Amino acid sequence: MVESLDLHLEFDRSAGFPGRSLESALRDSIRTGRLRAGSRLPGSRSLAADLGLARGTVVQAYAQLVAEGWLVSAPGSGTRVADHRSGSSRGARRAGPDTPPPQAPPRSRRKPRPPTASGPVIELRPGIPDLASFPRTAWAGSVRRALATASHGTLDYPEPAGLPALRAAVADYLARTRGVLCDPDAVVITAGFTQGLCLLARALHRRGVRSIATENPGLARHRMVLRAAGLTVTPLTVDTGGAEPDQAAGQAALLTPAHQHPTGAVLAPQHRYRFVAWARKNDAYLIEDDYDGEFRYDQRPVGAMQALAPERIVYAGSTSKSLAPGVRLGWFVVPEPLRRDLAEAIGEAGAAVSAIDQLAMADLLTHGDYDRHIRRMRLTYRRRRIELADRLAEVTTTPLEGIAAGMHALLPLASAGQERWFIQTGRRQGLRLTGLHSNDYWHDPADGRRAAALILGYAAPPSHAWQAALAGLGQLVQQSGR
């Protein structure tokens, strides 16, 4: 790996002492910051060939700069730029060309950086999985197998709708685990739900859709994306049975049926049927955001709504909650009339997803590693929700709201002022909290004045920080009572 690195240097090859010219060029590159601390240099054989020098000349130049403290070298890890940030950069610029930088102490003897004044922050915001539990080993294995077996043509510009291997694997997985009715031709691979929603909104607009209804409360980011595509957004009031179908208007509706965000309600069966009847009557489409549908703890997960009307419902899922938001992979199961318009929107935006990521995800699904990870995290999050409810029951008589599912629950509060107190005091004590009133969940801010709650995300803290999160939250609730 070291031999293949490139390095741009400017020095006088015609000078009588090329070794010294090389040393000076390297010093100047480090002194000016072009070569940063920790940067790896090419191997001596490779650099000598690139510069037209004898290998021994490069070896001697490296050795001299190591002796001066500019570089560090260790067997097996190559030659790197030394970390001499403890010295004054201003003084380094004033030093002569051969003045070595201050020697950095050995890594094992350096003092650790002190923590910030406010201490470590424990993340309790909703919608974030336990990133420390990402299946790194399984993912790495899938990448290796995918690259070992992929044809050359697979690495060409990918098809807008996604690679056939992943579309087939997703179709099989969704049919098996979520009851979705589809074949691989209906699956479109996206870089997560939000990107897919943006492209779908463009496709709907192209087909003449001008208005879409979304849940109230619901994510402001989704309303922003829909409006950016030229759609008018209208509210659907959410109650204990989910979104209210009688308020559906326009030519489309965006729903979170399995676990409404942020209230945690599940869309009642009668509401599901009424939404489907509305879509069929008005030649409209429903978008089912199944963002955390795999995670249900008090019973088997509710099946996808899409099976009620595959010709009217666009089903959408992603890996943002199941694996990690940074993976940027999602899938939309699209009724046939919308597929061409969506493919054109993807092509126009240049929004096709990395072929290697698609191949890796297909492998993760077909080898069962994705299922194993979901089952493992389902047990983890179930246990955390129980522990959260038990801890809060010790300090308050107010029970958690929302079904036992997903990665968040609501703790109702008396007022918006109390919600602000929790968020501000929690921040000072190292807890990052989110409130129902203090966020842009509502179509009209006046709609949220009657509601106040903490939206407690119990998935984000890594396992070693979970008990500290429970203790800190319990103390905060006790303080609010006093």
Image: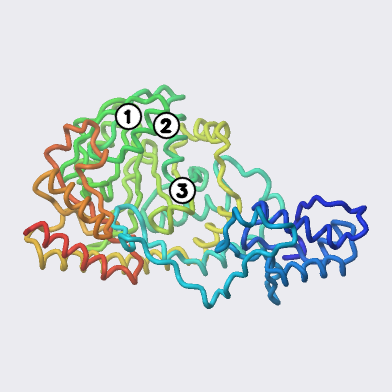
Helix, strand or loop at label 1? It is strand
**105, 405: nearer the viewer:** 105
- Which residue is drawn at the image coordinates 25% and 39% (left, top)? 441
- Residue at left offset 48%, top offset 50%: 329
Q: Quadrant of the N terminus?
A: bottom right
Q: Identify the colour scheme used.
A: rainbow
Please tell me which residue is depicted at 47% across the width and 72% down the height of the picture: 111
Kind of residue indicated by mark 1: Ile
State which tag comes first along the sequence, 1 or 3. 1
Name the residue beneath numbered marker 1. Answer: 212
- Identify the amino acid type marked 2: Ala
Q: Earlier in the sequence, mark 2 or mark 1?
A: 2
Front residue of this view, candidates 185 and 316: 316
What x and y, as percent, mark residue 2?
A: 73, 65
- Secondary structure state at the residue bearing disc 2: helix
Tell me what residue is drawn at x 69 percent, y 65 percent: 100
The one of 227 and 352 positioned closer to us in this rendering: 227
- Tag 2 near tag 1, CB within 8 Å: yes
Observer-nearest of 441 and 250: 441
Q: Is residue 93 above or below residue 42?
A: above
SS at circle 3: strand
Residue 63 percent location from the top left of the image: 77, 71
Please name the residue that numbered disc 3 is placed on: 330
Q: How many marks?
A: 3
Quarter holding residue 201: top left
What residue is disc 2 on? 201
